[in-house]
Image (cartoon, rainbow, N blue to C red):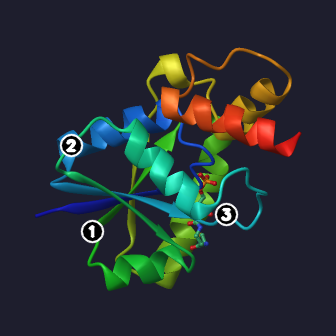
Amino acid sequence: MKVAIYPGSFDPITNGHMDIVNRASKIFDKVIVAVLINGGKTSMFTLEERVELIKDSLIKNEKVVVDSFTGLLTDYIKENNIDVIVKGLRAVSDFESEFQMATMNRKLNENAETFFLTTDMKYAHLSSSLVKEVFRLGGNIEDFVSKPVLNAMIEKEVKDE
Ligand code: PNS
């Protein structure tokens, strides 16, 4: 049984992320979508809110579970006997940081292998950060995120006013 983890900030989950989860679930026996902290980013949603939004957005699939973790990805992998880290690659610009993270993770745990799935071109322009920026500036993000995420973003914005 091959278990994969798809880690990310998911602040919030986009349609591009959901496509990667869906495709990874066809390759691996179990996929853990794990919300982890990216120290370099400030967040819109709490870890708990992000987990709920992922659960509300994903199509029911018994191979997929959702979790969150606040420590090192390599510690989570060791504790949960995970075989592979799955990451999505959009463009060459992603490669540099992803290559660095994959190498660091393997330095921390020699068994931590990273498996890259290239994005479907229809999601190549998507990132959580851009979706948030477009939303804040009044752009239409309906094609980029699920209904639950859109509603949660509207609610956040109303609360912040
Ligand atoms: O969606 P992101 O922001 O590109 O995901 C990055 C993430 C959360 C996967 C990365 O920052 C991470 O693994 N954070 C957990 C803490 C950790 O292990 N840091 C060292 C990474 S080499």
Task: Report the number of numbered marks.
Answer: 3
Between label 2 and label 1, give the one nearer the viewer: 2
Q: Amino acid at mark 3?
A: Asn
Q: Quadrant of residue 27?
A: top left
In the picture of the structure, the residue carrying the numbered disc 3 is: 38
Q: Quadrant of residue 112?
A: bottom left
Q: Amino acid at mark 2?
A: Asn
Q: Quadrant of the N terminus?
A: bottom left
Q: Are the two marked residues, 3 and 2, in contact with CB atoms closer than 8 angstroms? A: no
SS assignment at label 2: loop
Q: Nearer the viewer, residue 140 or 17?
A: 140
> On the rendered structure, is 98 left or right of 155?
left
Q: Amino acid at mark 1?
A: Asp
Q: Position of residue 102 (x, y in %)?
A: 51, 63
Cα gap from disc 3 to disc 2, whole angstroms: 27 Å
> On the rendered structure, is 134 left or right of 79?
right
Residue at (73% x, 68% y) in the render: 39
Q: Earlier in the sequence, mark 3 or mark 2?
A: 3
Q: Residues within 10 Å of mark 3 (few under 14, many from 20)?
A: few
In the picture of the structure, the residue carrying the numbered disc 2 is: 61
In the picture of the structure, the residue carrying the numbered disc 1 is: 83
* Label 3 residue near ligand 1, CB within 8 Å: yes
Q: Position of residue 91 (x, y in %)?
A: 60, 33
**Quadrant of ligand 1 in image:** bottom right
Q: Earlier in the sequence, mark 1 or mark 3?
A: 3
Q: Nearer the viewer, residue 95 or 122?
A: 122
> On the rendered structure, is 23 left or right of 160?
left
